[in-house]
Image (tube, helix red, strand yellow):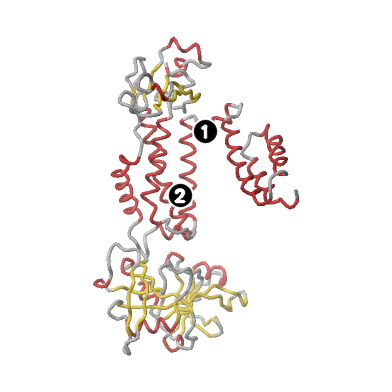
């Protein structure tokens, strides 16, 4: 059994989903079954324990446990969605990577800025200094300005001694291209982030103008800028700005990033990236990919996705069903609660989708940015499917499904599944096969004469 410790860890993790009073027996039973499973199928076997554990919790004899895992109560459903919306929003705005994708770009001409690379989706610095000079010489008709920077770890002498700091070595036109004030131009200058200024220089107000040794050379501190001023790839706490003469001392094979200001006439619209060909004076050519830094305001993207979802959702989702008029007198405040509950669920899932996708994009998951409309359609389908399974009076999930009828007699009698409200408000008839008589699910209200069959009569709470 020791050789199967990864599978044992999977089983122990799945056991936390089971009710506490049955956890030990459940875990012992699965561990005993694991003895007879071949090693090549052991992991697949143990992954099935999660489904079994969820089934046990859903069908637990404890009504409180069963209610919470199925979100039977409308307050439990809204509370779960509220926690999920709050957690995704806090993570999206709290982590630096996702926050940079959500907040507006700090650069004045962000719509005309693009990263230039040799591949469609570079995973790191992949443009050599030689390719950067090739772009400088032959891409004037594509770009107004082009800059180069190279992330690296460099030793810097600070007030606390010699420390290793993530530094960006950049051409002297980088901050001018980004429209960020980085102090007066010098052959070699150093720009500090506010975090590095506080940590390594003790927030010294006279640090600007000081000569600091960094990456083996002396540089003058030109400015201190905020962390929000940097939205380009690469972790950085300081920027070593060098003129063309000092930058030429680097090896031609040095890998870095290239950012460019695109000419308005050269940029195609509504494309995530595009390919260009660059020719030098000798006729040599090379291909590059341009990826814009800003794809537009995120709020506008969400509104467009929601509009497209509203157009597509009638053809891809389910109807709410047929609800007959209630013969039971009800308080005026209880009548619109079903629609208020539906609107509250939709309002809570609205921020969950974009925040979750932003977290996925920042984590490097492919195609996450293109899945906004699909994600909204799937989430709205779940909202409507959940609404279909609830009682229109108390909004609790319906239980006790019973199959009624036979397929062979579906043209003469009703064939489908019947679910009931545990509070005694009514029955839901869901046809197995849609016919002209039963095209969609139908709700049947029960009068007060049925209340004696339920532990909590309907009139006790919703009279």
Q: Earlier in the sequence, mark 2 or mark 1?
A: 1
At label 2, counting other C-alpha atoms closer than 10 Å, the crowd grade (few under 14, some 14-19, many 20 or more) is: many
Quarter of the image where one finds residue 226: bottom left
Instruction: Kindly give the residue lying farthest to the top in the view shown.
Output: 449
x, y percentage for residue 460? 47, 15
* Residue marked by disc 2: 89
Instruction: Kindly give the residue lying farthest to the front in the view shown.
Output: 408
Question: Residue, x 56% and y 30% (percent of image)?
Answer: 66
Which is nearer the eye, 384 or 406? 406
Question: Residue, x 64% and y 49% (percent of image)?
Answer: 41
Q: Nearer the viewer, mark 2 or mark 1?
A: 1
Tag 2, which secondary structure?
helix
From mark 2 to mark 1, how far is it between C-alphas? 24 Å
Note whether 204 is above or below 281 in the view shown: above
Instruction: Kindly give the residue lying farthest to the left in the view shown.
Output: 265
Quarter of the image where one finds residue 361: bottom left
At label 1, counting other C-alpha atoms closer than 10 Å, the crowd grade (few under 14, some 14-19, many 20 or more) is: some
* Residue marked by disc 1: 70
Note whether 364 is above or below 88 in the view shown: below
x, y percentage for residue 37? 68, 45
């Amino acid at each position: 059994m020791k050789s199967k410790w990864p599978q044992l860890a999977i089983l122990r993790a799945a056991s936390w989903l089971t009710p506490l009073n049955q956890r030990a027996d459940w875990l012992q039973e699965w561990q005993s079954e694991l003895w007879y499973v071949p090693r090549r199928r052991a992991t697949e076997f143990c992954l099935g324990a999660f489904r079994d554990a969820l089934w046990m919790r859903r069908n637990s004899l404890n009504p409180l446990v069963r209610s919470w895992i199925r979100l039977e109560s409308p307050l439990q459903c809204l509370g779960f969605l509220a926690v999920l919306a709050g957690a995704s929003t806090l993570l999206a705005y709290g982590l630096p990577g996702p926050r940079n994708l959500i907040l507006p770009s700090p650069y004045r001409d962000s719509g005309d800025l693009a990263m230039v690379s040799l591949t469609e989706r570079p995973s790191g610095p992949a443009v050599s200094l030689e390719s950067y000079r090739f772009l400088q010489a032959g891409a004037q008709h594509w770009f107004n300005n082009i800059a180069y920077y190279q992330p690296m770890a460099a030793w810097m002498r600070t007030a606390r001694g010699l420390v290793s700091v993530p530094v960006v070595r950049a051409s002297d036109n980088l901050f001018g291209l980004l429209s960020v004030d980085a102090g007066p131009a010098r052959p070699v200058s150093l720009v500090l982030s506010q975090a590095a200024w506080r940590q390594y220089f003790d927030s010294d107000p006279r640090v600007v103008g000081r000569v600091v040794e960094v990456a083996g050379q002396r540089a003058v501190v030109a400015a201190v800028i905020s962390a929000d001023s940097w939205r380009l790839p690469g972790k950085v706490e300081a920027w070593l700005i060098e003129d063309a003469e000092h930058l030429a001392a680097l090896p031609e094979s040095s890998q870095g990033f290239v950012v460019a200001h695109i000419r308005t006439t050269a940029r195609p619209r509504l494309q995530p990236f595009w390919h260009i060909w660059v020719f030098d004076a000798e006729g040599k050519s090379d291909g590059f990919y341009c990826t814009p830094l800003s794809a537009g305001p995120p709020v506008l993207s969400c509104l467009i996705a929601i509009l497209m979802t509203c157009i597509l959702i009638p053809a891809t989702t389910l109807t709410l069903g047929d609800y007959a008029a209630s013969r039971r007198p009800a308080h005026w405040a209880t009548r619109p609660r079903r629609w208020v509950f539906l609107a509250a669920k939709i309002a809570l899932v609205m921020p969950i989708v974009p925040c979750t996708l932003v977290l996925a994009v920042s984590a490097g998951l492919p195609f996450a940015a293109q899945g906004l409309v699909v994600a909204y359609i799937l989430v709205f389908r779940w909202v409507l499917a959940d609404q279909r399974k609830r009682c229109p009076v108390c909004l609790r999930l319906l239980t006790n499904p019973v199959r009624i009828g036979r397929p062979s007699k579906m043209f003469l009698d009703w064939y489908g599944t019947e679910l009931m409200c545990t509070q005694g408000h009514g029955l839901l008839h869901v046809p197995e096969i849609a016919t002209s008589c039963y095209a969609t699910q139908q709700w049947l209200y029960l009068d007060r004469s049925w209340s004696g069959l339920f532990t909590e009569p309907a009139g006790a709470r919703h009279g």
